[in-house]
Structure formats: structure tokens, C-alpha cells
Image: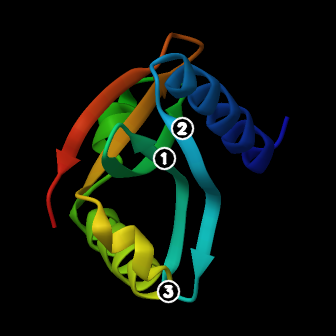
Amino acid sequence: MDRKQHGTDAENRALLWLEDQGLRLIQRNAQCRLGEIDLIMQDQSTLVFIEVRQRQSQAYGGAALSVNWRKQQKLALTARYLLARHPHWSDYPCRFDVVAFEGNSSPIWYKDAFRP
């Protein structure tokens, strides 16, 4: 399985798991010239921008730590752009979550993982 397929598989697993937790999918792989957000979901009255990461091991900090400051800034800029393109989304409070997979383990969900 190539790297892109691993990423898609992790996103599929994260989506199903988050839906089981009560979140509702709004958009998947939202792209613009600034970047991409893996999943945009609704958690009750909150709009959630979700980055999904998978690593085979915790070497170099693992999946969660790979969402570094630079990646956080890119996600925040992309979210701002998408909020401007979808004004009705601005009615909701927003947060940034990370769903991390280490190897074949269950996901670790970092709610409100960072604030831009």
C-alpha cells in the first residue's frame, strides 16, 4: 500500500470512529490553494476542523507531534479561507482536533488540539 492509500485508510478509520462518537461529517478533504483539511465535522454546535495523522511508530515524536507549529498555521489559514467561502459556517464556534494513529492501534483523539 502506498503512502496516499495509507492516508486515505487512516481518514476512513477516523471518520467512522468519529461518527461513532456522535460527530457529523460536513466535508471531507476540503482543499484550497493554501492547503487541505482532512475532515470538517460538526460536534453538537461546534464546527471541527480535523487533521488525521498516521505513523507506523513513535520515532521522531509519532503522529500527534507531527502536527507542528508550521502545520497548525497552515491549517488555520485554510480554515479561515473556507470560513470566508462558507459564511454560514461562521455561525458556529470552531475548534481544531487531531486524530492520531500509531501503527495499527486505536485512534487517539486530541480535542481542541491547538488554537491559532
Task: Determine crowd level at label 3: few under 14, some 14-19, many 20+ residues with C-alpha closer than 10 A.
Answer: few
Identify the element where label 1 is drawn: strand
Image position of 104 (left or right of 53): right
Q: Quadrant of residue 99?
A: top left
Query: Which residue extends farthest top?
Result: 105
| Amino acid type at image mark 2 | Arg
- The answer to whether mark 2 and mark 1 are in CB contact below 8 A is yes
- When asked about the image quadrant of residue 8, the answer is top right
**Residue under circle 1?**
41
Residue 60 visible? The answer is no
Q: How many angstroms separate mark 2 from mark 1 (CA)?
A: 5 Å
Task: Indicate which disc, 2 or 3, sits on the residue closer to the N terminus.
Answer: 2
Q: Identify the residue position indicated by label 2 in the image.
A: 24
Q: Residue at x 43, y 31 (%)?
A: 100
Query: Which amino acid type corresponds to the residue marked 1 in the rendered image?
Result: Met
Task: Determine the residue positioned at 30% across, 68% down.
Answer: 91
| Distance between mark 1 and mark 3 Cα atoms | 16 Å
Question: If the image is split into quadrants, where does the C terminus sit?
Answer: bottom left
**Residue at image x 35%, y 26%?**
109
* Vertical order, 113 against 67 (above or below): above
- State the image coordinates of residue 38 (x, y, percent, origin top left): 56, 54
Image height check: is 58 above or below 32?
Answer: above
